[in-house]
Image (cartoon, grey):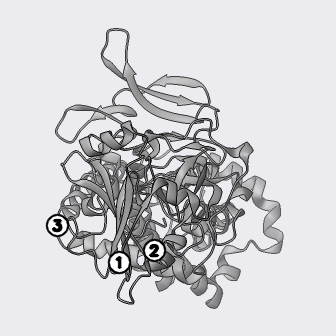
Amino acid sequence: MPRAVRSYLYQRHAFFVRVTHWINVVAFTLLLMSGLQIFNAHPHLYWGTSSYAGAPPLLSITARPGPAGEPVGVTTILGHEFTTTGVLGLSRDPDGRLARRGFPSWMTVPDTRWLAMGRRWHFFFAWVFVLNGLAYVACSIWSRHLRRDLLPAKGEWRTVGRSIVDHLLLRHPQGEAAKRYNVLQKLTYLIVIFGLLPLVMLMGFAMSPWLGSLWPGWVDLFGGRQSARTLHFVAAWLLVAFVLIHVFEVVISGVWNNLRSMITGRYRVRIEGSSDAH
Amino acid sequence: MRIDRRLLLTRRRLVQLLTGAGTALVAGCDAASRTAWFPKVLGVGEQLTRGAQHLLTSRRSMAQEFTEADLSPQFRSNGTSNPDNPVYQAHAATGFAEWALEVDGLVDSPAKFTLTELRALPARTQITRHDCVEGWSAIGKWTGVPFEEVLVRVRPSAAARFVVFHCADPMSSGERYYESIDMEDAYHPQTILAYALNDAVLPVANGAPIRLRVERQLGYKMAKYVMRIELVESYAHIGRGKGGYWEDRGYEWFAGI
């Protein structure tokens, strides 16, 4: 028996949140894909200052001849080898030929092996990404979005455990509660905005030989240039993990309503009535 | 539990939408990369980077220097490891005894320096990190003449804006390697013409008889097998006009990132 539902449209996301969100989607996607192109030029990660300090790489994505002489894609993580033919180390070119390549062409910008162009895309969208991010943070502080919507309220900390259980059971805030970020969402956004994003940016800076001269030795605080390259890579994939979870949550909690609220700002709030007679 | 069929359909539609968007994105990016105008738009980022990095650092900010303990066991040879050039090979056979570095162009007194003469000039030793554009780093101990010592002897004219390094190594296209730096980097204390690596005579694999070190930039700026140095107002007439062998192939002239 249908229950009485009252609904209305609520202005959930401010204009600057929507604009910076979609610029961020484009910039992050292109940064990731051009970043993988750059990684492919030397598909190994190390810890320390140099790549030739004697220790084996932490990660290697290469190809080598298999038992019958045919090439095999091999990914080595912390000494553990995995056969990854078809995706990592050895994958098909856009024209269908098998080629040695760290990440496959469908994940890189440009799709062919082209380091110089990958760098152009990367450093252009790095500027877009950073300026957009700074604009978001500035507007968030100025409009009180940060204090009002992102920082957990005093009593909210005690509900973190319950919120984790709710997320695992795919239970989502309904009605009036859906107008605000939930506590786990707030904490995740804060970690991403003030933790992961500054880290990925700083580790990018740490790889620049020119910026190394800003204060000689600062790169060592992060373990050296090759460590910075590794941290840049790890932070980028943590951001990908965040995006995947974020998109999953968007899809299961009402994809069109969520999408509309990030485009026009309007979110339909449904309040289930209690007029049922049983 | 109530199954919302609209939602299932929506999810499938969303996956299709994302896959389609992804494929279109990759294809679109590749097509844009091959136009004449789009890479120029992307180049704005490089201009910003160069401007910002120069704004943040002083003209003589020093690249980090390391200790003997940090040295890479063997300094990797990248690119050319033995120039396929008969003139170079003849010099190498005699230990570069007859070789002389020519310095000319926009200078008041063009000069030639033998290896012995270069070694007799004041020297600087620095243990630095070499960062390749590909992503790897190696640490080496370089000894050589601060380039400033050469400049004060040839006396650059006021019109000189860039220093071009002409090298001995022919690349796969048949063109010889070359590179260029600006006067700011030319006078930088860590810019040296290195003739020794790790306390030994610079090996052919690493650029004998001399290789340029410009420590705040990437490896491709640090020309090996330098034969002639030319001071110019513009490098537009050299090679394909972008200031270096790799620059002519799309890499940035400013390699500080």
Tell me residue A208's x, y (percent).
54, 63
Residue at 83% from the left image edge and 61% from the top image edge: A158
For label 2, the residue is A127
Q: CA distance from mark 2 to mark 1?
A: 10 Å
- Residue A272 in view: no
Amino acid on which disc 2 is placed: Trp
Quarter holding the C terminus of chain A is bottom right
Q: CA distance from mark 3 to mark 1?
A: 16 Å
Amino acid on which disc 1 is placed: Val
For residue B44, the mark is 1
Q: Quadrant of residue A207?
A: bottom right
Q: Nearer the viewer, residue B202 or B69?
A: B202
Report if the CB atoms under discs 2 and 1 are less than 8 Å apart: yes
- Mark 1 burial class by Cα count in 10 Å: few <14, some 14-19, many 20+: some
Tell me residue A49's x, y (percent).
64, 49
For label 3, the residue is B35
